[in-house]
Image: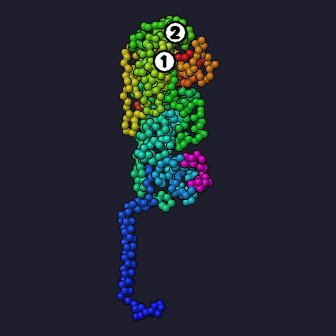
Amino acid sequence: MATRGKGNHFHIKNRSVERKLIRNRLLLAMAGVIFLLGILISRFYFLQVIEHDNFVTLSDRNRIQVRPVAPTRGLIYDRNGVLLADNRPTYRLSIIIERVDNIDTLFDDLRGLIAISQSDIDRFTKARRRGRAPYQAIPLKRDLTADEIAKISVNEYRLEGVEIEAELVRYYPYGELLAHTLGYVGRINERELKSFDEDTQKAYSGTYSIGKIGIEKYYEQELLGEVGSQFIETNAHGRALRVLSREDPAPGKDLHLHLDIELQRAAHDALAGWRGATVIIDVKTGGVLAMASTPSFDPNLFVTGISYKDYNALNRSKDLPLYNRTIQAQYPPGSTLKPILGLGGLETGVIDESTRIQDPGYYRLSEGDRLYRDWKKWGHGNQVDLHQAIRESCDTFFYELAVRLGIDLMHPIGSQFGLGSKTQIDVPNERKGLWPSRDWKRQRRKLPWYPGDSLNVSIGQGDVLATPLQLAVMTATFANRGIRHEPHLVSRMGDEVISKKPMSVMQASSVNWDYVNEAMAAVVHSPKGTAKKVAKDITYRMAGKTGTAQVIGIAQDEEYDRDKVAERNRDHALFVAFAPAEAPEVAIAVVIENGEHGSSAAAPVARALFDKWFALEAARAANESGNQPAQTDTSQHDTQPSADLTMEATL
């Protein structure tokens, strides 16, 4: 077939060439289709087979979330099984930030429904900055009321990312009675979070609280428990539909204390109106039966976050309610040291029972030297022995004893009773006090030790400092005839019984123990004893020692005049004791800041607590035997300073 071309030329078609061209084009097109189909099939294979598990996981992440389950914090009980630290169910408003388009708009919406403070938002913002798992809810407001829960629930459909969660919150039913001893839990702060390693972060992934002070901090790991987890199916809006599986958390261990809440209440009441502290110890075990510091505070304020107003009020108070005086306050122990130094004098042989000195009301190291005054201006007589010196708190006798002993013998005596070192009690932040020595002064002050330094130490003044707990341990060690136990609050942790071996044992003759013990009993029961007033109507024998410690120095030619001294600069009042004197059960140390006289301010507190202890023991014995408890007088005696008793630095 011919065709007319341009310029009237004719071309003959070559059908064979055309068919070949068409065939090649079809083959090329088919190859392209097959190639593209191969790519598509390989891609399908890659996605459906090779990456199947990965995409299933990604899909499940949209649908299924793994959330930590907080363990139940261990409970705390007293020695009789009374619950001291509980977990109370509450509800919190939380936000899953990944589900929120505009957080500021959400805050505005929530403010239109319930009260959301700037503090709530600030805490939320801080928590948001911390490391957390994706889709983990962040608390915004805790302790929701029933009305607030209802308002949020009704409007939940338009509050994307908002959830109401149930949680257990720590609760302290006895409030300020145990604030310093139990301590409290509070929200984990930035400093604590930065100190967490990977394992610790996992352990706290289900909770926002941690022990801050006291037993709650010391036994944090035991009380915390182990975090669990649960797989939750959610809808497209992130709402939980159902729990697919769950690994239960392990609850924290319960703690049982030596502490008796009724004795603790009595201690707190006896200190009411004072700034002070008292510690009561079981002589045979070292178990702490009561431990009170006043003024105190309500630990429940800190659990879910204390307000700025409340914290500032506590932190700025001149009375320092946040200060745990039992283990952190360091006081000159005054004359409470005299029995152990007297025992040391007998044991070293520098004095004996027949040693007597003349007391004109002062002591002079050498002619023309300064006078070291006795608290009794006119002195205690010409034949003062150790028994009278302890009974009537004769400073002059102990000045002479200090010269004979010297600091090199005095220092090991006090050290054996625990002075100058931490007691190792099971609460944090304990201070170790100060029991000075020749080496200490040379290293710390670059000065030699002077004889006058020894005189000050002998009456518990000068550089000597001790905490109320140390004084209680010292007294319990004396009552236990040299066996010093490590004081401890926890008697049982879960099913594990906590027992402590003695820390040290001081060897001394039974004759010397008996002699000083009887002198301490005379402090209370002798008509000339400095604490004789607390012996009225007493039904047991108490051995004790009064003490008064100067807060400010008094010039040699001046006398102490309480009317000219500001209240907070007045002397501290101290009293240590154990009972029954013949077979000690408990030892007590009492410190009353600015109470002036141990005999009139601190000793009545100890008497009230001994009365309470023996009444509790009688009731416990009667209950075990099935009989009615005997009636015991547990009324508290007057704890105000007596106007007719004028004392100086160390009585």
The residue located at (39%, 60%) in the rendering is 54
The residue located at (36%, 18%) in the rendering is 507
| Secondary structure that dominates the magenta span | helix
**Which circle marks residue 447 in the picture?**
1
Q: Is residue 112 visible?
A: yes
Question: Does the stretch in magenta take in 459?
Answer: no
The residue located at (46%, 91%) in the rendering is 5
Image marks 2 and 1: residues in contact by CB distance under 8 Å: no
| Amino acid at dot 2 | Tyr
Q: In the structure shown, which secondary structural element does the residue marked by tag 1 occupy?
A: loop
Identify the colour scheme used. Answer: rainbow
Q: Which percent across, then down, holds residue 400?
A: 47, 10
Q: Which percent across, then down, holds residue 21?
A: 38, 83
Along the line of sight, the residue nearer the viewer: 611 or 60: 60
- In this rendering, would 565 be left or right of 93? right
Circle 2 sits on which residue? 363
Q: Is residue 372 above or below residue 174?
A: above
Q: Earlier in the sequence, mark 2 or mark 1?
A: 2
Residue stretch in magenta: 103-125
Q: Is residue 424 above or below residue 11?
A: above
Q: Is residue 459 visible?
A: no
Label 2 or label 1, whichever lies nearer to me, is 1
| Amino acid at dot 1 | Leu
